[in-house]
Image (cartoon, rainbow, N blue to C red):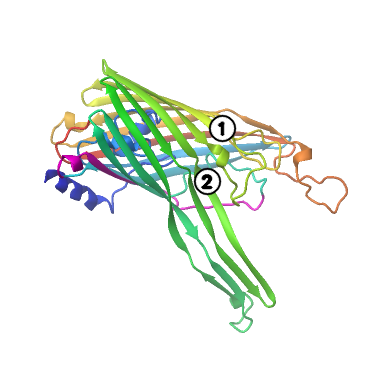
Amino acid sequence: MKRALGLLFVLSLAGNARATSGTAFGESARVAALGQAVTARPGDAGSMRENPGGLADVGEPQLMLGASAGRLSIGFTRDGEAGTERERWLGGFGLALATPLPGPDWLSRLRFGLALYVPADHALRVAVEERVDQPTSPLYDGRPDRMSALAALGYRILPELGFGAGLVMSPTLATPTEVSYDADRADGVERDVMVRLDRDLEMDVSPFAGVRAQPLELLGVGVTYRAASVSRAGGKQRTVAGGILADDPIDYYMFWDPAELALGVAGGPLAGVSVSAEASWARWSKFRTGFDRRLDEPFEDTLNLRAGVEWQALPWLAARGGWSLEPSPIPEQSGNENYLGSDAHVVALGAGANLRKLWRRVPLAVDVFARTRFSDTQHAKKDPSRLDDASESLPGQQIDNQGYPGFSSTTRFWQVGLSLTLFVGKGQAR
């Protein structure tokens, strides 16, 4: 009965509460502070996407709320010219909840999780440049600019083994449009143009699954697979002007995250210290342009390395640190395309206070984090033989590529965040 009431309480808040979970730049404060190396660690409401198998560790209903903010700066300098810099603020809110299900033993082994992330600026932002040589970063541009949600189930197969699976949902925009001209419609040429719009925000889903095992008291292992996450903006576009008819579909493609396979181990706690490490293979070779086309120079798959450490300084207070290496999937940009991004080291720090262990009547945990990315400078030299001719009607090769004869780019990013976790019930998390 208490679990059922707890579940109803959590669901009653789901419509209005917000927290960070489950998307790029939207992890929980605990996950971010540990460098995302949590695949093998006991799970909670904020780590479902990292490993849904960790849901089996949740022993009571919990609701997580939070927010994050960061600053992104991307610099671009073409050889022999003054550089430019694009800066922007990033932020987001959301919700994450996890709970065991009430009922007999076989049903109480099942856990349910739900998370929602909403960027501060956009529910969905699809920006496709007119030119293929426009300098853009697939690693940072656009990835934080979409709303996403996930639902997951976890099951305690054995006391030492949990399995979980779920779906990540990202918005897809259907945009059928019809433009026509009627000279008798109104006074003035501008008012004679008629535009009929039909906009539908649909959801595209990608599955993920994971297993977490605790074969020894001080050793945990975990593995997670996440399918690629993409969005589309497309539809039929019909333009009629007198005897002119253009009836072409549009199909824009936003590649948010590659398919990823992660394997992790965790040790401890020993003397209050626990450590975790993991490696993840990311399938960036499937990346496509905003026009849903293959690249002239395909991206490369990457192997990311992550590590995290947590020190339980007091029964109610923990300090955390994390590091990760994120190699760039972007090959040498010697052709028409100008994709920006280089290898990056991510360093994170954070802390968590479980106030319930300090004051039993306060069932609340507070977690904070700060992290920054140290990126190498990207350098590129163009090969004229691989560049398109800007004007075939003129003699010789006319080059107007925006990265010619070469360029360099830098990226700086820092972020801070806060998570609040409310515990409902008296269960003990594993």
Q: Is residue 222 visible?
A: yes
The residue located at (49%, 51%) in the rendering is 231
> In the picture, which quadrant includes the C terminus?
top left
Q: Position of residue 353 (x, y in %)?
A: 25, 30
- For this orientation, the residue located farthest to the top is 271
The residue located at (49%, 30%) in the rendering is 373
Q: Is residue 21 left or right of residue 332?
A: left
Magenta span: 103-131
Q: Position of residue 100 (x, y in %)?
A: 21, 41
Quote the CA–CA distance across marks 2 and 1: 15 Å
Q: Quadrant of residue 138?
A: top right
Is residue 105 in the magenta section? yes
Picture layout, residue 233 above or below residue 109: below
Q: Quadrant of residue 66?
A: top left
Is residue 363 in the magenta section? no
Depth order, front residue of 48/337: 48
Q: Is residue 247 left or right of residue 304?
A: right
Q: Residues within 10 Å of mark 2 (few under 14, many from 20)?
A: many
Depth order, front residue of 333/182: 333
Q: Amino acid at mark 1?
A: Ser
The tag on residue 255 is 2
Q: Amino acid at mark 2?
A: Phe
- For this orientation, the residue located farthest to the right is 395
Total marks shown come to 2
